[in-house]
Each structure stands twice: as C-alpha cells, then as structure tokens.
Amino acid sequence: MKRLDLAFDTHKDRAAPAAAEARVALAQTGPVNLTGLTQDELAAFLVESGIAEPRQARMRADQIWGWMHKRGVTDFAAMSNIAKETRAALAERFVLNRPSILERRQSTDGVVKWLLGLSPGAEAETVFIPDVGRSGALCVSSQVGCTLTCRFCHTGTQPLVRNLTAGEIVAQCLIARDDLDEWTAEPDARRLSNIVFMGMGEPLYNLDAVARAIDILSHHEGLGISRRRITVSTSGVAPKIPELGARTGAMLAISLHAVEDGLRDELVPINRAYPIKDLMAAIRAYPGLSNARRVTFEYVMLKGVNDSPAEARALVRLLAGVPAKINLIPFNPWPGSPYECASPATIRTFADIVNRAGYASPIRTPRGRDILAACGQLRSESTKERASDRRRRERETAEG
Ligand code: SF4
C-alpha cells in the first residue's frame, strides 16, 4: 500500500501541490489510501483520477470526507449519498485503510493500548486513558522509535525507524473511535475527548505531519476535536515551540523533569542543545499563553534524583510568571531502567510546595501498569517476540 506523505505547508496555497502529489501517487500501481488527506487534497485526487469534474470535486470531497471522519466509514459502498457508479469508481482507485492492529491490551483500570502495524518493520503504540481531560485522552505517537534518548523513557532505547505520516497519526484516532464504538455516540457521550501527542517520538521533529494531522482532527466537519483539547508535548526543541503554536493553536506541554542544566543534560539530553534558559524563552513566546491556556510541565518523579524539596522550590522560581500547571508523574519502571519511583510521601511533599506557590500540581495516577504501559514497551516486547520466533524457525529449519 502506498503511503501518502504530503509535505507541503498547509498554510500556503494547497491546490497546485495537491494536484501534483495526486498525479505522482496515482501514477503508481495499486489503490491509493485516502486517510490523512484534507478536503482540498481529496478534491485534487478526485479530479486527477477523473472521478470528478473540477467544479463538483469539492462537493464530492466533502461528502467522502464526512463519511470518513464523522461516521468512520472504510468502505465506499456505504456512502449512500454518492451515486453507485461513482462509488464503484472510487473503490477501483482508492482505499480507506487503517493501520493493522497487531496487538490490543486492556488494563483492569480501563486503559487500552494498541500496537499498530504501519508498514513492514514500522510499529507504533497508541493508548486510550479514560477520565483524562473532559472524558478520556488518546495518547498518539508521532514517530516510530525516537532520535532522542531521554534516560527515563523506554522509547528512548529504540532507534528511530521513521516519522509517521499525517494519515497515520489521524488513523490512530480513527482506530480508537472504532474500538470504543463511538461513531454513532452523541458528542457529549463520547469517551475520547482529548488528544495528547505524548506517545512514541518527538512531535516537533515531525512538525509538518503533526500540524496537518491537527488540522484534520480538529476540523468542525470531521472529528471536531477542539484545538484546546489537543496537547503537543515536546522534550524541548526550543526553536520549533513558537512555530508549533502559530501553526496548530494546540496546547503545549514540556517534558521538563529537572530544574538545572546539569541534571537535565543527563535526563533529557536535548537540553545540551537547548538549555533551560533557551527553553523558557521559547515557552514565553508561545502564542496565546494565558491563564486559560496554560503550559503543562511534565515532571517524572525519580527517587533521589530530582525529587527533593529544594528542587520543588527551584521549580517554582523557574516558572515564575508563566501560566503553568505541573503534572507530577510517578516513574513507571521498565526492565533495565536505571531509576526507581520516588516514594508517595516524597511526591506529596513536592506537590505541596508547588501547590502552595499557586500552581496546580496534580499527581498523575499510575495507569495501565498491568499492560506494559511505559511508552514503547509493547513495541519492544513484540519485536523481541518476533526475533525469538525467527530464531525458533531457524532452529527448526536447521534441525530439518
Ligand atoms: S520522552 Fe519522548 S523525546 Fe524523549 S526519548 Fe521518549 S519518546 Fe523520545
């Protein structure tokens, strides 16, 4: 299956590059997957494939797009307001495929985790966490693996395989809606209300695809997830932070974890390129920052590493004047991780200091611990299983 990775800037004129991309994709053999296209791009594909005249292409694209994003339809035959011959022509040239679900695990606390097969050798995780945001948050991946090596993060032990396309990011949300059976639910009754880019990868190293995906996910004629309910978390790619805000209007989260450069260099090595001073300057330049649009600072609590009262007080000083909320995250250990989780009492003391300074500092409840909830763990396990299967097959072949 062809992957469509349209790289042009969504803020510029889209018609000409969309037509060019459509011509390239259609010139290849096999059906083209339309998941992840904007309505303008979809219209260009309809024109270039000869399925719609230019003057009716946008109307037709809107119909198809609505079926895809409002109803979750994956079969053109179900699009009852489109003529039968047109549906047949669409099915000949196009598909509406989702990535395959390689594994699904559900925790006793309601967390659901999917391991998705995007293309050969490219697997990514998506996690639904109930009771976060208005009703529940979907944690999506933006890369397979990661180039960064945050010490506490399991994904940081996996090399980067590739960036996800916008379509693959959007598809994570479509799969969750399928699985949660939410296509026909009233908007207020839906459990998936928020999206957080906190899965595998550094979103700001794949900003074009992330921005395109947010345009699609937030579109009022589609999934309609408000940009205020979409949060992008970065490890601190400072030069891209204001651009993220300008292009997406999404909420910002910072994976902070330390309040001075020496320790942050160790825990979040990108800090060596963009130290805390540069990071804070970029955060202060984030468009639209206010008490109604606060930055979330993520702070993983590591025993004896970053959990002292002095560090809590330094955190308060560092954030002075920034509309902020601090999420304290009890560390979720994974096999081979060099850290332990801070004790509940230490975390409470830390939270009290930050709270007394006027910042909301919720302690995140550990979720999904029974289903390999550390980011990247399920993918590692699946890769290990494949390797052991391969070794077993090789042994069996050798034994004849
Ligand atoms: S925390 Fe994010 S940026 Fe850091 S290694 Fe993990 S996935 Fe990559």
Image (cartoon, helix red, strand yellow):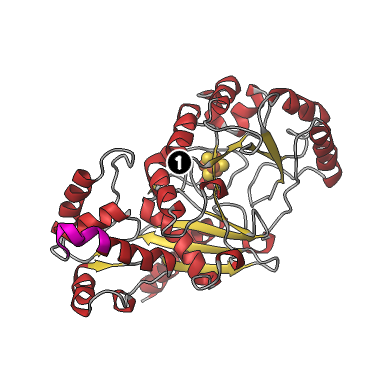
Instruction: Tell whether position 53 is magenta.
Output: yes
Indicate whether 368 appears above or below 147: below
Q: Is residue 334 above or below residue 353?
A: below
Q: Label 1's element?
A: helix
Q: Which residues are magenta?
A: 52-59
**Amino acid on which the number 1 mark rests in the picture:** Thr
| Quadrant in the picture for the C terminus | bottom left
Image quarter where the N terminus lies is bottom left
Residue at image position (52%, 58%) is 126
138 and 349: which is toward the camera: 138
Establish whether ligand 1 lies closer than 8 Å to the Cβ of label 1.
no
Q: Is residue 205 left or right of residue 85?
A: right
Q: Out of 158 and 54, give the one closest to the viewer.
A: 54
Task: Check disc 1: other Cα within 10 Å, few if <14, some if 14-19, many if 20+.
Answer: some
Q: Which residue is mark 1?
A: 248
- Residue 47 position by quadrant: bottom left
Is residue 214 visible in the rendered image? The answer is yes
Q: Mark yes or no: residue 26 visible.
A: no
Whether residue 368 appears in magenta in the rendering, the answer is no
Expressed as whole percent of the image width and height from the top left, the position of residue 353 reads 83, 33
The percent coordinates of residue 58 (x first, y second) are 25, 58
Picture layout, residue 115 above or below residue 330 = below
